Amino acid sequence: MKNLKYIYLLLASLIVLSCGDDFVDVASEDENSEDFFNSEKDYQLALVAAYDYLQTTSKFYQYAEIASDNTLCGGESATDSPYIQEIDDMIHSPVGQSDGGLRTMWQWMYEAVNRCNYIMEFQDKTDFPNKTSVIAQTRFLRAYYNFILVKWWGDVPMLRDKRIRFGDQFTIDRTPKSEVYDLIEEDLIFAAANLPYVQSETGRVTKGAAQALLGKVYLYQNTKFDKAAEVLEDLINNGPHRLLTSEEYPNMFERDWENNIESVFEIQYSDVDGGSFDCFQCLEGNYSTYFNGPRGFVDATGKFDAGYSFNVPTQEVVDAFEDGDLRYETSILDIEQYIIDNPGSSYDETAGYEQTGYFNRKYIARKGDLDIADAALTNPDNYRAIRFADVLLMAAEALAEEGDYVQARIYLNRVRNRAQLPDVTTSGDNLINDIYKERRVELVGEGHRFFDLVRTGRAAQEIDGFITGKHELFPIPIEEINLSGGRWAQNPGY
């Protein structure tokens, strides 16, 4: 987080052995994790360590977008990052995701949850005035990480308020996703009740973020539309957020507009530290943005940087935009048209695989950062994880599912009118389908489409190669199953 000092906190438990020989009975230079949490500072340091793993998640939105029908993998060639190509082609397997793929995502999220559970395990050790806020932020972060785990893998190993330590994998079973969702809900309800709408430090979790994520969690379960509508409407009516105006919207994804009034939960990135391909989880920068840019791109305006040409939009998603939709220019970079409009610009049209001529304009690298090596990995472009437009469309969907078509149309049309599009007047299933369509074009490039298709049962008809009963979930990396001694069964179909 740009306004929080990032640290890497080693949360290791040391076993102290007694010995009769005084010369080997030497105090460790490392602090025993059992003796930590003696002051507010200790809790705050651990909390920052829990926040730190938000930065690893830039890979998640990119992979989810590629898994959907919105984009193709792209890259340099058919053999560039094969684990991403496999996800694009729906041929990913438990054994093909070790080198930078799903296994790293699994590991990072469990490290993130463990950091949250470290705080929760010792939540009663020391009291201080701001403790409720620390616990509320911790519980939001745990919910956010667990929501990623349950979306991608379904039933997952889980402990409540306790770290998973080495050896526990032999005794912990996969927890049914319904129970994982129960804990996520409990965490978010607590966070929403104990956090303010506006924090004094940019990047910290707010009440609105907790409400929005809770509404999304209810929506994803397909049986709690009434609860989703209730919490989302409370945020809409009482929170501080609003849609940017039509005049403001084109600036939405520019750096000067980060943490704007429409951003409900935004993951902070920074370019003040360097980084390398050897440790993606160590990066403070947003590495996904450079991966999304055109290869060999020279922008005469000095606005956009080049890239590795991954995550390229399809013609189908380009065609999903209605004529006159102002979001098109903000969402899609038509490289050929851009070069025509900006003489002196160029790119290497012979480089890259599966190139469509379109790029994800929301999340490609901008010029103007510090370019500390490796410059491709250290972009300071924030990720808007939840926007107010998403909140309005989720509320519209929940209300439409509950039969309140009038209010559902009001929220839907607020989003459409901002895009300078006419009102939708439909009802019933037609209205729900209109909301689905609106979610696609409003949120294109942001990593929501795949899970929207899965949770609404439309994935098989929209995604080439998608197999019902299999691809709703991703495979648990085979190495993790092996480490459990085979205790964890693989997801169906893999």
Image (tube, helix red, strand yellow):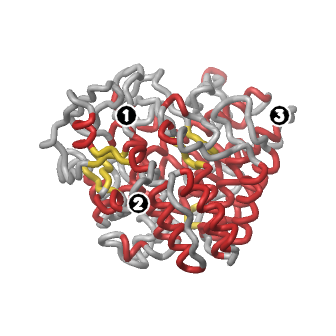
Name the secondary structure under disc 2: loop
Q: Can you tell which quarter of the image residue 66 is in?
A: bottom left
Compare residues 409 and 28 and report the one nearer the observer. Answer: 409
Position above or below: 103 against 339: below
Q: Which residue carries the number 2 mark? A: 322
Name the secondary structure under disc 3: loop
Disc with the residue nearer the chain's start (1 vs 3): 3
Task: Please name the residue shown 44% across and 75% down the image.
Answer: 458
Crowd class of label 3 (few under 14; some 14 to 19; many from 20; radius 10 Å): few
Q: Can you tell which quarter of the image residue 240 is in?
A: top right
Circles 1 and 3: CB atoms closer than 8 Å: no
Disc with the residue nearer the chain's start (2 vs 3): 3
Q: Can you tell which quarter of the image residue 412 is in?
A: bottom right
Compare residues 235 and 340 and report the one nearer the observer. Answer: 340
Q: Where is residue 355 in the image (x, y as percent from the top left)?
A: 21, 50
The amino acid type of the residue labelled 1 equals Ala
Task: Please name the residue shown 71% across and 37% down the image.
Answer: 34
Q: In this view, does 465 lie to the left or right of 474?
A: left
Q: Which residue carries the number 3 mark? A: 130
Position above or below: 456 against 43: below
Position above or below: 395 against 1: below
Question: Split into 4 quadrants, where in the image is the C terminus?
Answer: bottom left
The amino acid type of the residue labelled 3 equals Asn
